[in-house]
């Protein structure tokens, strides 16, 4: 028993193992409480709800790893979505050709990336605090978007946009596939590339990283730029899921993404944290919320359970560390 | 050890679950997704939903998202589809954003009833307790009377994306422009009226910037309350008039002190009851057409193409009626 445990722990890490056990516990409890919980419909519902939040969480994860924060994620996603919507509208709305969609996606990703790049440059080269810079960017993007759209919707897109938010590819929801690809790219970037290593080092101790020859400014700029790119992808998925874009769609997600990162064991001061546990934490949050909805519980209770869950995880983590230290 | 710390969490979930899971399984189920939970307007609607649900034998619940974000409504509806309810009711924050998920619900064989969403196309019926024209013009006329038919006024709506609020605002403005040429609208319309704080701040700012401002027309349940508070703070009662639909219990004091001059509303509890009544009719296969009588709406003449049932069931809120309405739990 102990041996298998150690093997599993060595393979996935204690964080992943703990969260996976918790996820199983949550699934068992809801499965017992509601016969519908394990139905295909519910699993499908969870699979469609996860990606937009998941991609935004990935966008939040990397800045947090460097000890920062990106408060502009949802509005960056909105502005990117608006860009795509605008390109589609310019080219005939419902009848827009596929080429317009491709150009729109490139434009949307460029806009998101640019927003991230500007934030990154200001944070890295001017040395302003990430919270202030991203807050400023958030307000700017929100104001800009509301000014351009007068707070209204842009809707009416070609038929082929729908499957990105609602379709299946070999039985797996397309948005989920996009999220899985995003998570794998993020995982590889953080664990296998030079940039990922530099991001961790900058998060642990930016001065030490600088003295060791890491180009900290370039690293920080790249971190926020990539965060912006990821927001743009989330924005495109949101566009197709809602079949419309408006500034303010998904506003409620900002704090949930931070919550998911911390639940996944990311150090709020930077330097530590991995993609896999964050993805698990996201799944747990979504399962808790969908499960409580299925039982007809109040939405505010779901929020309370999330909070309770975060506190619980922190307490467990503290005990876990003490327990682990006693052993060695 | 882990168990010890997880158990409070799990037991919380179990308690929450067993409270609701106990409900009978064979009754038809209905979920009504409203704009936001925990505000008096939708609390009253919830009472109506439960009341009528018990009467008609439908297991009806209301789901109020924690913030007025259409993304949260989409998630709640996805969960209802997964739950396999028979009827979904919705009071949309943003019509366009809900179309895909409502289409999904209808494809799953679920009946969809909407309220305050006349532009939705993926519904079986949308019902309104007030016509946009009647509602806008009745308010505009009362504002004009209070202001003596002249002066500057400002317009609040719940959000610039709530088409209904904007339709009221359009009709009110058109009516005033046609009937009272001496009245003048200040600025564009402000999308603050779903929040007391935003309405209060905006009203304070507008009064500071426009000394000639004599009236606020606020379409959105929190707008008159916020603007009324601003008037009270500035001691402008009697000089600046606030009109609009609001929850009487919440605005009772402000109406009595004169900070809110009055308004018209429909009864959210009645809307809740109509949701369930219509849900029952839909699953029983009752045809709704010209002259059908629906409890709570009266004899209706629906717009068959737009799938809208629009009626005028307005009640006036003023210093005389506010207590009675507030005692109804509104």
Image: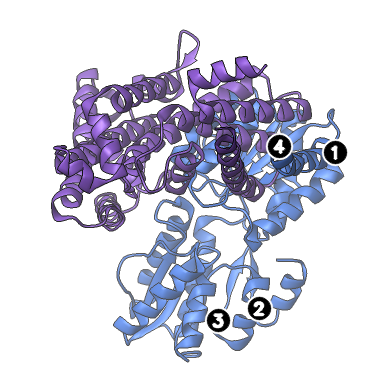
Q: Disc 2 to disc 3, how far (Cα)?
A: 11 Å
- Using a 10 Å C-alpha cutoff, classify the residue at mark 1 as few (fewer than 14 neighbours), some (14 to 19) or many (20 or more): few
Tint of chain A: purple
Q: Is mark 3 on a helix, strand or loop?
A: loop
Task: Specify the subunit that label 2 lies on.
Answer: B
First of labels 4, 3 by sequence position: 4
* In this picture, residue A125 sits left or right of residue A160: left
Task: Specify the subunit that label 3 lies on.
Answer: B
Please name which of the two marks, 2 or 4, marks the residue nearer to the observer: 4
Tint of chain B: blue
Q: Position of residue A74 (x, y in %)?
A: 36, 44
Who is closer to the viewer here, A41 or A183? A183
- Using a 10 Å C-alpha cutoff, classify the residue at mark 3 as few (fewer than 14 neighbours), some (14 to 19) or many (20 or more): many
Q: Do labels 4 and 3 share a chain?
A: yes
First of labels 1, 4 by sequence position: 4
Q: In which quarter of the image is residue A227?
A: top left
Who is closer to the viewer here, B153 or A71? A71
Residue linked to disc 2: B252
Q: What element carries label 1?
A: loop
- Using a 10 Å C-alpha cutoff, classify the residue at mark 2 as few (fewer than 14 neighbours), some (14 to 19) or many (20 or more): many
Q: Disc 1 to disc 4, how far (Cα)?
A: 46 Å
Could you tell me which residue is drawn at 29 percent across and 25 percent down?
A: A189
Q: Disc 4 to disc 3, how far (Cα)?
A: 62 Å
Task: Specify the subunit that label 1 lies on.
Answer: B
Q: Is the C-beta separation of discs 2 and 3 under 8 Å?
A: no
Task: Tell me how the rendering is colored.
Answer: by chain
Residue linked to disc 4: B1
Q: Is the C-beta separation of discs 2 and 1 under 8 Å?
A: no
Q: Is mark 2 on a helix, strand or loop?
A: helix
């Amino acid at each position: 028993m102990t041996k298998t445990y150690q093997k599993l722990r060595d393979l996935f890490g204690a964080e992943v193992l703990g969260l996976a056990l918790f996820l199983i516990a949550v699934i068992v409890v809801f499965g017992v409480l509601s016969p519908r919980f394990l139905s295909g419909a519910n699993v499908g519902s969870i699979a469609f709800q996860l990606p937009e939040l998941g991609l935004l969480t990935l966008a939040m994860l990397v800045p947090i790893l460097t000890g920062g924060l990106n408060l502009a994620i949802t509005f960056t996603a909105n502005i990117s979505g608006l860009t795509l919507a605008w390109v589609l509208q310019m080219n005939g709305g419902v009848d827009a050709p596929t080429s317009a969609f491709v150009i729109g996606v490139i434009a949307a990703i460029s806009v998101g990336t640019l927003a991230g790049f500007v934030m990154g440059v200001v944070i890295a080269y001017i040395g302003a605090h990430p919270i202030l810079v991203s807050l400023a960017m958030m307000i700017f993007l929100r104001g800009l978007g509301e000014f351009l759209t007068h707070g209204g919707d842009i809707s009416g897109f070609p038929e082929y946009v729908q499957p990105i938010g609602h379709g299946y590819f070999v039985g797996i929801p397309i948005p989920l596939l996009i999220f899985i690809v995003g998570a794998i790219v993020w995982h590889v970037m953080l664990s296998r590339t030079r940039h990922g290593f530099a991001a961790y080092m900058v998060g642990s101790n930016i001065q030490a990283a600088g003295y060791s020859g890491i180009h900290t400014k370039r690293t920080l700029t790249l971190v926020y730029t990539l965060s912006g790119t990821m927001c743009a992808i989330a924005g495109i998925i949101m566009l197709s899921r809602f079949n419309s874009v408006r500034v303010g769609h998904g506003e409620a997600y900002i704090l949930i993404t931070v919550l998911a990162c911390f639940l996944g064991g990311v150090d709020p001061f930077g330097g530590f944290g991995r993609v896999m546990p964050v993805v698990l934490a996201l799944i747990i949050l979504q399962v808790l919320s969908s499960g409580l909805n299925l039982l007809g519980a109040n939405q505010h209770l779901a929020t309370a359970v999330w909070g309770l869950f975060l506190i619980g995880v922190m307490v467990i983590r503290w005990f876990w560390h003490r327990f682990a230290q006693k052993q060695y | 050890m882990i168990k010890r710390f997880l158990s409070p969490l799990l037991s919380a979930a179990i308690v929450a679950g067993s409270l609701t899971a106990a409900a009978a399984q064979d009754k038809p189920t209905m979920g009504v997704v409203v704009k936001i939970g925990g505000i008096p307007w939708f609390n009253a609607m919830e009472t109506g939903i439960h009341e009528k649900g018990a009467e008609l034998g439908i297991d009806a619940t209301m789901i109020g998202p924690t913030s007025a974000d259409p993304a949260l409504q989409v998630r709640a509806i996805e969960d209802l589809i997964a739950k396999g309810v028979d009827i979904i009711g919705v009071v949309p924050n943003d019509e366009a954003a809900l179309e895909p998920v409502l289409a999904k619900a209808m494809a799953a064989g679920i009946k969809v009833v909407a309220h305050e969403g006349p532009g939705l196309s993926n519904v079986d019926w949308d019902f309104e307790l007030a016509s946009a024209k009647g509602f806008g013009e009745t308010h505009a006329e009362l504002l004009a009377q209070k202001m003596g038919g002249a002066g500057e006024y400002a317009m609040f709506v719940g959000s610039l994306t709530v088409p209904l609020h904007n339709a009221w605002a359009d009709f009110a403005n058109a009516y005033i422009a046609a009937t009272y040429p001496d009245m003048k609208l200040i600025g564009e319309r402000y999308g603050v009226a779903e929040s007391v704080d935003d309405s209060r701040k905006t009203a304070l700012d507008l009064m500071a910037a426009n000394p000639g401002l004599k009236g606020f027309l606020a379409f959105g349940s929190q707008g008159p309350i916020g603007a009324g508070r601003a008037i009270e703070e500035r001691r402008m009662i009697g000089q600046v008039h606030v009109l609009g639909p609001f929850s009487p219990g919440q605005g009772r004091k402000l109406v009595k002190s004169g900070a809110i001059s009055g308004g018209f509303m429909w009864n959210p509890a009645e809307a809740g009851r109509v949701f369930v009544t219509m849900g029952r009719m839909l699953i029983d296969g009752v045809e709704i057409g010209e002259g059908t009588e629906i409890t709570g709406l009266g004899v209706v003449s629906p717009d068959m193409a737009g799938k809208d049932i629009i009626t005028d069931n307005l009640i006036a809120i003023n210093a005389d009626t506010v207590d009675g309405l507030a005692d109804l739990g509104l």
